[in-house]
Image: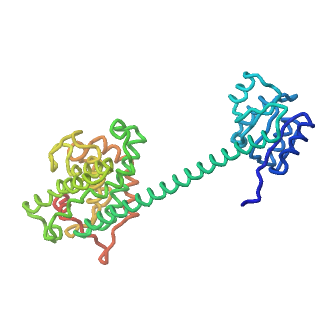
Amino acid sequence: MSDIRNKVLLVDDNLTNLSMGKNILKNIYEVYTVSSAQRMFSLLEKIQPDLILLDIEMPEMNGYEAIKKLKSDSHFADIPVIFVTARSDEGSEMEGLSLGAIDYIYKPFSGALIIQRIKNHLITVEQRKTLERYNHNLESAVREKSEQVHELKNTVITSIAEMVESRDNVTGNHIMRTQAYLKLLLDELVEQGIYSDVTRGWNFDFLFTAAQLHDVGKISISDTILNKPDRLTAEEFEIMKTHALLGVKIINSIEGNTREHEFLRHAKTIAGTHHEKWDGTGYPYGLKGREIPLEGRLMAIADVYDALISVRPYKEALPIPEAERIIVEGAGSHFDPVLVGVFQTVASRFAHIAQNYRDSSPEGETPHTPLERARVA
């Protein structure tokens, strides 16, 4: 059992009452006595009592004024206060309790009574503190576990995305770059208040994580097509294009076994619509204009830009200014013209990301997907 005793502070302008109270409590508690509310506040700068016994009828600052000051100060507000007073009317008791006192003891008081009252309240306070510590520890444990699950989920998603991309020799840097481009575009949308009616309520962390799965449907495309070193035939290109709907199908199957529908909704939308074009000539649905979900329109710019600046087996990477020109010229045909305007605002930061996450290989080249070869050529 701990030898640490609870601290009790007695505040009374009557020295006889202070002496009597200290004699009653000193064998059980560590007792401090002061003769005025002003001295109480001076002492509180040095000690933190577990409970205050506070007289009401005192000169200069009475007990009601003192408890108001106590409760208004975050350093002292949680210290339980028991009023000890000669007032026995119901109105005075109600006023004291309404100001935050936990009990009201009348003078002259019985030693056994005041000891029991203090004991009961200190037990209640300790139980409350124990419950608060338990809740805090529980919240911390749940938060830590949630963070671990979230980190594990992101790691699994990233690993799946990189595995899919690696089947056709695309590096994981493509994933990092497109995520970063997407974040730039979305941050600028928010900054300018563009499409706020659409983005309001979005969980951006979910969106950025979901972007990694934009080509997840390629996992169902054969290696023969994915790794073909030459230009795709028209028939092969049609097969390659099915990866968008295959991605939707894969995410639908996952959605049936989880509750995280918001994350999967973003993933499914991006996978299924990032090859749509503003003029309706894209695939797989042939959507036009704002029929194309905003996630898909954003990802289209990020994905095509990255394709343009990346090395292909049949061509060098385009210079960044040339890639920017192609994106700008695609406004109103391939891309949402409003988003192209946003892109122009952050184009220099796109270039910075491209430089920071450059692809590398022994030959200094990074092959890209047959789908992008067919699209960009």
- Residue 312 or 290: which is nearer the viewer? 290
Q: Is residue 331 left or right of residue 122?
A: left
Residue 115's spot in the image, x, y percent? 78, 43
Residue under the point 29% across and 61% down:
309
Q: Position of residue 302 (x, y in %)?
A: 30, 53
Residue 17, compared with residue 233, is above or below; it is above
Q: Is residue 143 visible?
A: yes
Q: Position of residue 142 (x, y in %)?
A: 47, 55
Picture layout, residue 290 above or below residue 206: above
**Could you tell me which residue is drawn at 48 percent across and 58 percent down?**
144
Which corner quadrant holds the N terminus? bottom right
Quadrant in which residue 74 is drawn? top right
**What colouring style does the render use?**
rainbow
Mark count: 0
User: Which quarter shows the C terminus?
Assistant: bottom left
Q: Is residue 50 left or right of residue 304?
A: right
Image position of 365 with respect to 34: above or below: below
What residue is drawn where x is 39% and y is 51%? 205
* Residue 230 against residue 377 in the figure, above or below: below
Residue farthest toward the bottom in the current orientation of the protein = 362
Q: Is residue 326 visible?
A: no
For the residue pair 245 and 138, the one nearer the viewer reads as 138
> Residue 371: x and y, percent?
18, 61
Q: Nearer the viewer, residue 193 or 140?
A: 140
Q: Residue furthest right?
A: 16
